[in-house]
Amino acid sequence: MAISRTRFARGRKRQGGAVESGAKMPAQLMEGIRAEKKHQGGAADQKGMTLFKTNSLANRFQIGKNEKRSARKTTLPAKTKKSPNPFTMSAIQKQDTEIFDYIEREKKRQTEGIELIPSENYTSEAVMEACGSILTNKYSEGYPGKRYYGGQENIDAIENIAIERAKELFGAEHANVQPYSGSPANTAIYFALLEFGDTVMGLKLDHGGHITHGLPIAFSGRAYNFVQYGVNTETGLLEMEEIRKLAHEHKPKMIVAGFTAYPRDIKWKAFKEIANEVGAITMADISHTAGLIAGGELENPTPHFDVIMTTTHKTLRGPRGAMIMCKEKFAKKIDRAVFPGLQGGPHEHAIAGKAVAFKEALQPSFKEYAKQVIKNAKHLAEELKKRGFKLVSDGTDTHLMLVDLSNKDVPGKAAQEALDTVGITLNKNTIPGDTRSPMDPSGIRLGTPAVTTRGMKEAEMDRIADWMDRVISNMEDTALHAKIKEEVKEMCLNFPVPGIK
Ligand SMILES: Cc1ncc(COP(=O)(O)O)c(C=O)c1O
């Protein structure tokens, strides 16, 4: 409900009158409420007064005079909206113009630019609605049916729905939808199934692994004895025989597979065979590819692996968060490690968002989406190769690609920054065997989940490859960059972003 009585309330206060719940509203204000109600297809009249009562409570959340003064002092670049209509202003706009303004700017950035960061996506409006709902108000430590607080009848139902949908989506025996995000979820898995100091195998960060897969300076690398495997630096591919040799040499208690910057499909069964040979627990981190697996485009590790972790906000197109799935025999340990082992109260608004996203991913249209993500990625990879770009592993089976820019004589950081100026967003990335630093590596990483959500197809991938090539081949030509920025914006405005009007 966008109708504000706060101006009326403040006005009356200034005149020295207390604002009472039964106060009569001026005709002009009632007029505005009627117009707004009509616009929303509802009736005002009597209800208008009821709303007025409740809004006196809402007024407590409005900023006070002093805060307002200090907010005015903050220097912000030119405002995105002039003279807002008080009847259509959002709550944030009324209460916190600084944050409102930056959200508006971010909307503009997301609308006018091309998002190629492969770990990003656009959630549906329904997912965002769940995440922005009153569910954020509720504490619900524990699990459905076994909570430490009262008032859980709706929360339990929502969490159970999320769990059942997750299990259906991946064919899992057990699902825990409470992890706040991917990093705590991985930490919970280690905490559940390992002792500190145990040996674990994971892929090196600079070969495509994640920091939670044993980076020496990270918690995982400090708490456990991670033996890090790599890819073949010539081919960019995982070599299962090398991994087998390492496993036999170090006898890990767990083998982690699943990566953050590996463009090829993963041979889950081969990993499982190796783990069986040395008696290791298998853990798959499908954060990047979960949507492609759910959509039936990539092989699902769930039937083979002991534990699966995925973030929910990448190709799966849900809210920021994660979940853990496992075989029934590990269920108790996993649940206990998530709560009370690592986390406190679950974020039920995010869990509702996960449930909504899982329902979306169960629809036939999501299969089409997953298929197109890969088609677009393969097409973009080929178009980049035609323009002389060198791709790690020479292509992709998934949604992402890693480009080695050494033959272009442009480091990854400079490429990322130049592309940023034209509205093409991707990230600098190390390439296997990189001789440069992670903050200024030799490569870039890009992918197609977000652009595919907007409805872009092969024709748009051609244009993206062309713009990338022209920018990276003409790093100093700012006039060209300005022209490309306009072209990028023009194309993007034809492809709406879900939830942005
Ligand atoms: C493979 C993998 N695992 C775990 C994570 C961690 O997820 P989060 O950033 O939600 O903590 C990521 C995030 O990029 C990832 O790519």
Image (tube, rainbow, N blue to C red):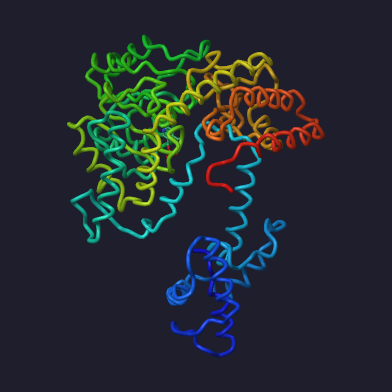
Q: Is residue 317 above or below residue 394?
A: below
- Where, by quadrant of the figure, is residue 140 drawn? bottom left
User: Where's residue 444, x and y in %?
Assistant: 59, 27
Pick the residue in front: 210 or 36.
36
- Where, by quadrant of the figure, is residue 319 drawn? top left
Image position of 268 (left or right of 101): left
Instruction: Identify the residue shown where x is 39% and y is 59%.
Output: 134
Instruction: Identify the residue shown where x is 43% and y is 45%.
Output: 127
Q: Is residue 141 above or below residue 398?
A: below
Pick the residue in front: 35 or 142.
35
Q: Is residue 70 above or below residue 357?
A: below
Pick the residue in front: 100 or 262.
100
Residue situated furthest top in the rendering: 241
Q: Give the quarter the ligand 1 occupies.
A: top left
User: Where's residue 447, x and y in %?
Assistant: 55, 27
Image position of 195 (left or right of 459): left
Instruction: Identify the residue shown where x is 27% and y is 55%.
Output: 154
User: Where's residue 356, x and y in %?
Assistant: 38, 43
Q: Is residue 52 above or below residue 43?
A: below
Instruction: Identify the residue shown where x is 36% and y is 20%.
Output: 299
Image position of 202 (left or right of 122): left
Question: In the rendered picture of this protein, how many numbered marks are placed on residues?
Answer: 0
Image position of 12 (left or right of 354): right
User: Where's residue 9, x and y in %?
Assistant: 54, 80
